[in-house]
Image (cartoon, rainbow, N blue to C red):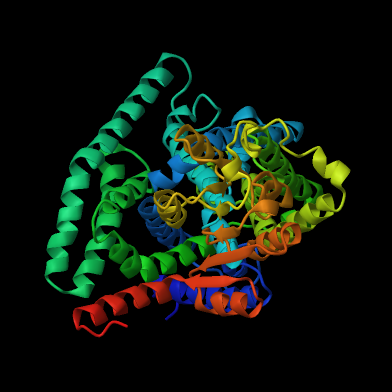
Amino acid sequence: MLHSTPLITTIATALGLALVFGFLAVRFKLPALVGYLLAGVLIGPFTPGFVADGQIAAELAEIGVMLLMFGVGMHFSMDDLMSVRKIALPGAVLQIAVATAMGAGVAHFWGWPLGEGLVFGLALSVASTVVLLRALEARGALDSMNGKIAVGWLVVEDLAMVLVLVLLPPLAGALGGKGPDGGGNLWLTLGITLLKVSAFVALMLVVGRRVFPKLLWLVARTGSRELFTLCVIAAAVSIAYGAALLFGVSFALGAFFAGMVMRESEFSHRAAEDSLPLREAFAVLFFVSVGMLFDPKVLIEQPLQVLAVLAIIIVGKSIAAAALVLVFRYPLNTALNVSASLGQIGEFSFILAGLGASLGLLRPEGQSLILAGALLSIAVNPLVFKGADWLEQWLESHPALAAKFARSTDPLSELPMATDEKYLSRQVVLVGYGRVGKRLAAELHAQDIPFVVVEQNRERVEQLRANGITAVSGDAADAGVLIQAHIARASMLLIATPDAFNVRQMVAHARMLNPHIETVVRTHNAAEAALLAQENMGRVFLGEDELAHNMGRHVLERFGKAA
């Protein structure tokens, strides 16, 4: 009976074991993704016992890739990328180049050909967006400047990998894989591929951006929730399939652009929310199918190679990223957090490894090494973050050593000598110039109250100074940055950033430097607001409370009952 229903057997076994191992992983404070991969290892051909149908698992994985990339496209924000473009764009490109070179160099040392080494290095160069987002959420740092830089960095990595997925098939022959040979045919094939991709992208951006949002609107008008969800999923899968059939591009690229055009709709948030359960279910099947390709014997037979891969992912990539962030004159805290965020690999590495294997550009041993690196790097990523925190504290306790990483040559890290005296005494120190900080700054300016902005985004500080606003670049959790904002003589510390992770450090340093300073804190979490008030962090404002208060006051005024 089981052999007559291989599809049901594969799905039931994969989801059931993924649930069990995912639950165990979370209980051990590991990402659930580790459990999904282990479930795949258990039902794969390299371990004893039940073996799932590999062909069916591979097709389910293709659907998983489509929906995974559709989700990436729906959450792709050009605004988020542009806000950190000066560090994320060059930083990510250089870090990919460094990590690829390290991976290719190690592969060359092992005697692999250039093409295999290149694919191997690329697979080690890109971090998992899923793991990163969940790690930042767990630390409450997703909306912080460090979080935005890390996410922007990952967006650039994702876009680079999309380009690799497009270019690798026509280049496979020249790299020693299955495909057109080098010479004139290579350039012809490459040109045709780029022409097809350009036609598809143009079609999606010109026609798709108008058609699919309107289609969503028409379906939403029916009031049927199931029809709306069906429309979203059908669009994702159909566009991905049509792109592969008509334009010869990968399912992944087609689904990515389907998500991008769907984002243009006013119903994009609902589309993301309604399709989330199905997207996550098939993403689980994708990770399980990836785990099925892992041969555990590689851990025993090639432990040194596994350690080399792990060293590239956790140490090599992290050091390269930290160095690049420091070169761009961001603080040590940002460098350590971004480097810890990138010290793992995930879904794009699996997709690239699968493509490389299908093109004859990656041997099974290489796939197993990539999977081993992913499993171990994801499992230890929380420890990498803790190690980064410990290193930062250790450096702070050794001022002479920490001074070597200080941005003494950065003109934006201190106020200009010609700063007006009114910004140096009795001023308000405003931390953060995001949506809330910008409105607070406008109110202070309108009332002619002097203020100094402390902002981690260097590009934003440059723009503020160009607009005549007094600002300092740096992390307000660093006492040195607060000193540059002249906190010792300030009248108020106004924390407008939602960075709950560092707010206590900001207040502690401010009170140490100025015991009489008044502190005002913003938060968007009721439990965090209660905790901050209990810890005497100053006046705490909760977004929902203030919104309800102002709406209630308006209603009372309309009924003539305002106090």
| Apparent side of residue 409 relative to residue 144 in the rendered image (left or right) | right
Residue 320 pos. (x, y %): 69, 38
Question: Quick one: quadrant of the N terminus?
Answer: bottom left
Outermost bottom residue: 561
> Where, by quadrant of the figure, is residue 435 drawn?
bottom left
Residue shown at the point (56%, 37%) measured from the top left: 87
Residue located 26% across and 32% down the image? 199
Q: Is residue 219 left or right of residue 539?
A: left
**Residue 470, picture quadrant:** top right
Picture coordinates of residue 70, whole percent (x, y): 36, 54
Horizontal and vertical percent position of residue 153: 54, 43
Above or below: residue 201 compared with residue 279: above
Residue visible at 67% across and 52% down in the picture: 489
Residue 221 lies left or right of residue 404; in this view the side is: left
Q: Is residue 310 visible?
A: yes
Quarter of the figure with the C terminus: bottom left
* Residue 466 as seen in the image, left or right of residue 278: right
Q: Position of residue 405 (x, y in %)?
A: 77, 39
The answer to whether 181 is drawn above or below residue 247 in the figure is above
> In front here: 435 or 546?
546
Q: Evaluate whether residue 44 shows in this view.
A: no
